[in-house]
Amino acid sequence: HVQLVESGGGLVQSVGSLSLSCAASGFLFSTYYMGWSRQAPGKEREGVAVIDSDGSDDSAVYLESVKGRFTISKDNAKNTLYLQMNSLKPEDTAMYYCAADYGSMHWAVRGGVRRADFGYWGQGTQVTVS
């Protein structure tokens, strides 16, 4: 069965950096598009970044508020998804979730990156920016 395990969250000061990882198992990693979403207390979950199954940098799309600060990457040889977060702001504080699905990445983001939808989710890792 699909398993997604996030790591790398923590407490960081404003303008600092964090790198999240998501170790995947139970499915053919190279055929799934993947992404990161987040949910802050009292707010709806929102998509942050999505990347296509082949992990090409050109395929990556981002929530407007994180463009230029966050970078998503997918290593198909290591079955791992990453999110490099730089210039962090207090409003980035949230639980961050790794997600995956099979099919068309473009279908998943048809309503915008914020509304990106996936069939499989990890348990999340907390990011707190002070």
Image: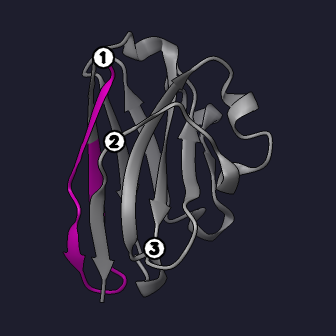
Real-space Cα distance between discs 3 and 2?
16 Å
Q: What separation in Å lies between label 2 and label 1 (alpha carbons)? A: 12 Å
Find disc 1 in the rendering and name its residue. Answer: 1
Other-residue count near label 2 (Cα within 10 Å), few / some / many at <14 / 14–19 / ≥20: some
Residue at disc 2, secondary structure: loop
Q: Residue at x 36, y 64 (%)?
A: 95
Question: Which residue reaches farthest right?
Answer: 111
N-term mark: 3 or 2 = 3
Which quarter shows the C terminus?
Answer: bottom left
Q: Is residue 15 magenta?
A: yes
List x then y, in percent, for residue 124: 31, 53
The segment highlighted magenta reads 1-21
The disc label shown at residue 122, or none: 2
Kindly report which numbered mark, 1 or 3, lies closer to the viewer in this rendering.
Answer: 1
Which amino acid, by three-letter code, is at mark 2?
Gly
Residue at 49% over, 53% down: 37
Compared across the picture, whether 125 is left or right of 50 comes to: left
Q: Which mark is residue 40?
A: 3
Residue at left offset 35%, top offset 43%: 82
The vertical placement of 37 against 5, above or below, is: below
Q: Quadrant of residue 46?
A: bottom right
